[in-house]
C-alpha cells in the first residue's frame, strides 16, 4: 500500500510539473518568439538596405566604435556573449535583461554596414537573457531558472531559424558536451514549437530549408565518401574555431583600446570587401549558401568567409557564428565533395551540417538540423559525416565556456572546457 501511495504521489508531482512547464514554457516561447520575429525582420531590412545602398559599408569603422561605446555605457563592456548564457545554464550565473536589447541593436547595426556575422548566436543571447529575467520575476529557484534560460534559448533559435526540433535539442546539448539536460526536454520543446508557430503565423518560415538536390544512393562508396568529407569538415571546423579565438587574442594584444580595435576591424573588413569586389561575403552568408547550393563553385570561398567573420567578430562587432559556420561548410563541401564523387548540392548540405557539428560539438542537433533543412533523404550519410566530424574535431569549439564532460574517444569523465 505504501508503494502505491508513493507512486500516486510521484505521478501527481509529475503531472503538476508538466502542467507548470507547459504554461510557463509556452508563454516563454511566445514572448521570445515575438522578439525574435522583430529581430528577424530588422536583420532582413538592414540587409536589404545595404544591398540597395552598397555605400553603407563605408560606415563599418564608425559602427564598430558605436557598438563598443553602447556596451560600455550600459555597463557591459566586458560582455561575454553566448558564453555567459552557457554559464547561466550550467552554473547559474546571472544574465542581465539589458543583454537582449543590446545584442538586438548591435547585431542589426553590424548587418546594416556589412559585418560578417550571423543571427542565431545573438538569438541565443536574446532568448537566454529574457528567460533568465522572467524566471527571476516568477521567483523560480536556481534549478528551474536554468530550465527557463534554456526555454528562452530554444524559443528564440526556433523563431529565427525555423528549426524547432533542432532548437530544442541544441539548447540542451550545447552547454555540456556528453551530458544532455533531459529535465528540460518538455519545456524546451514546448517553448521551441510555440515560438516557431508564432513566427509562422506572423509570416516567417513558410518554406523552411534549402534546396540541395537529391543525395546519392546509400552504397559502400557513398558511405566512404561521406566519411572522408566529414573528416575534412572536422579539420575545417577546427580552423574556423581557432581563427575566431586567435582573432580576438591578436586584436587584444595589438590594440588595447576597444573602440580603436573595433574601428581598425571595420577598416580591415571594408578593405577586404573592396578587394573582393563583391559584398557576397558580408552579412550572415545566407545568400552565398543559396548560390553555392544552386550550382556555383568557388574553391576559396570558405577561406574568405572565415577571414571576414574572424575580423568582424574579433574586433568587437556583434552577431552570431552559426550561419557563417554553415556558410563555410557549404563552400568547402561544394568544392571538395564533387572531387570525392558526391553530388554538388548534397556535398554542400553535408559540409554545412558537418562543420556545424565540429564547431559546436553537438552531433544530435547537427543530425536533426540536416533533417529540418534538407528533408529526410540521405539521413544515414548525414549522420555518418556528422559523427566523424564530431569525433575528429577533438576538443575545439566556438564557445570557450562549453564544458567537455565526457571524452570523445573513451568512456571516461574529463570535464574540461572546449579549446
Image (cartoon, rainbow, N blue to C red):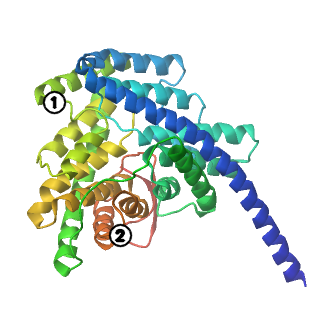
Residue 223 at what x, y percent from top left?
A: 22, 75
Q: Image quarter for residue 184?
A: bottom right
Question: Do callouts 2 and 1 mark residues in contact (Cβ within 8 Å)?
Answer: no
Q: Is residue 215 above or below residue 403?
A: below
Q: Which residue corresponds to the image point at 36% horizontal and 16% vertical from the top-left?
A: 65
Q: Locate residue 372 relative to residue 200 in the image: left or right.
A: left
Q: Which mark is residue 317?
A: none
First-in-chain label (2 vs 1): 1
Q: Nearer the viewer, residue 409 or 193?
A: 193
Furthest residue to the bottom? 1
Q: Which residue corresponds to the image point at 28% horizontal and 66% vertical from the top-left?
A: 385
Residue 363 at what x, y percent from top left?
A: 39, 63
Residue, disc 1: 278
Residue, disc 2: 409
Label 2 to label 1: alpha-carbon separation:
43 Å
Q: Which residue corresponds to the image point at 56% horizontal and 42% vertical from the top-left?
A: 33
Furthest residue to the right? 1
Q: Image quarter for residue 411?
A: bottom left
Residue 87 at what x, y percent from top left?
A: 54, 45
Q: Nearer the viewer, residue 396 or 305?
A: 305
Residue 328 at what x, y percent from top left?
A: 24, 47
Q: Is residue 98 above or below residue 343?
A: above
Which secondary structure, mark 2? loop
Amino acid at each position: 500500500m505504501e508503494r502505491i501511495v508513493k507512486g500516486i504521489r510521484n505521478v501527481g508531482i509529475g503531472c503538476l510539473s508538466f502542467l507548470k512547464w507547459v504554461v510557463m514554457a509556452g508563454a516563454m516561447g511566445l514572448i521570445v518568439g515575438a522578439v525574435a520575429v522583430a529581430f528577424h525582420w530588422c536583420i532582413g531590412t538592414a540587409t536589404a538596405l545595404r544591398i540597395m545602398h552598397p555605400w553603407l559599408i563605408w560606415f563599418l569603422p564608425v559602427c564598430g566604435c558605436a557598438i563598443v561605446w553602447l556596451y560600455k555605457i550600459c555597463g557591459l563592456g566586458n560582455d561575454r556573449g553566448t558564453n555567459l548564457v552557457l554559464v547561466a545554464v550550467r552554473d547559474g550565473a546571472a544574465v542581465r535583461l539589458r543583454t537582449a536589447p543590446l545584442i538586438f541593436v548591435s547585431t542589426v547595426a553590424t548587418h546594416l554596414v556589412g559585418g560578417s556575422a550571423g543571427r542565431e548566436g545573438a538569438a541565443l543571447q536574446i532568448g537566454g537573457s529574457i528567460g533568465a529575467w522572467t524566471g527571476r520575476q516568477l521567483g523560480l529557484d536556481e534549478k528551474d531558472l536554468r530550465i527557463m534560460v534554456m526555454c528562452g534559448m530554444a524559443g528564440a533559435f526556433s523563431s529565427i531559424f525555423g528549426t524547432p526540433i533542432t532548437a530544442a535539442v541544441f539548447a540542451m546539448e550545447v552547454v555540456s558536451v556528453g551530458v544532455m539536460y533531459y529535465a528540460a526536454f518538455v519545456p524546451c520543446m514546448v517553448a521551441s514549437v510555440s515560438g516557431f508557430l508564432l513566427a509562422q503565423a506572423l509570416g516567417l518560415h513558410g518554406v523552411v530549408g534549402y534546396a540541395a538536390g537529391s543525395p546519392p544512393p546509400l552504397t559502400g562508396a557513398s558511405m566512404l565518401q561521406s566519411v572522408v568529407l566529414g573528416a575534412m569538415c572536422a579539420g575545417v571546423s577546427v580552423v574556423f574555431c581557432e581563427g575566431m579565438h586567435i582573432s580576438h587574442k591578436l586584436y587584444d594584444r595589438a590594440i588595447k583600446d576597444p573602440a580603436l580595435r573595433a574601428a581598425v576591424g571595420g577598416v580591415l573588413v571594408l578593405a577586404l570587401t573592396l578587394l573582393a569586389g563583391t559584398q557576397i561575403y558580408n552579412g550572415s552568408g545566407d545568400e552565398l549558401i543559396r548560390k553555392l547550393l544552386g550550382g556555383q563553385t568557388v574553391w576559396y570561398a570558405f577561406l574568405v568567409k572565415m577571414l571576414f567573420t574572424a575580423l568582424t567578430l574579433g574586433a568587437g562587432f556583434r552577431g552570431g557564428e552559426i550561419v557563417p559556420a554553415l556558410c563555410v561548410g557549404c563552400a568547402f563541401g561544394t568544392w571538395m565533395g564533387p572531387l570525392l564523387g558526391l553530388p554538388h548540392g548534397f556535398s554542400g548540405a553535408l559540409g554545412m551540417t558537418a562543420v556545424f557539428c565540429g564547431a559546436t560539438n553537438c552531433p544530435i542537433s547537427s543530425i536533426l538540423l540536416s533533417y529540418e533543412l534538407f528533408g529526410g533523404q540521405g539521413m544515414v550519410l548525414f549522420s555518418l559525416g556528422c559523427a566523424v566530424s564530431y569525433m575528429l574535431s577533438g576538443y575545439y569549439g566556438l564557445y570557450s565556456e562549453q564544458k567537455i564532460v565526457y571524452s570523445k574517444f573513451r568512456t571516461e569523465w574529463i570535464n574540461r572546457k572546449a579549446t
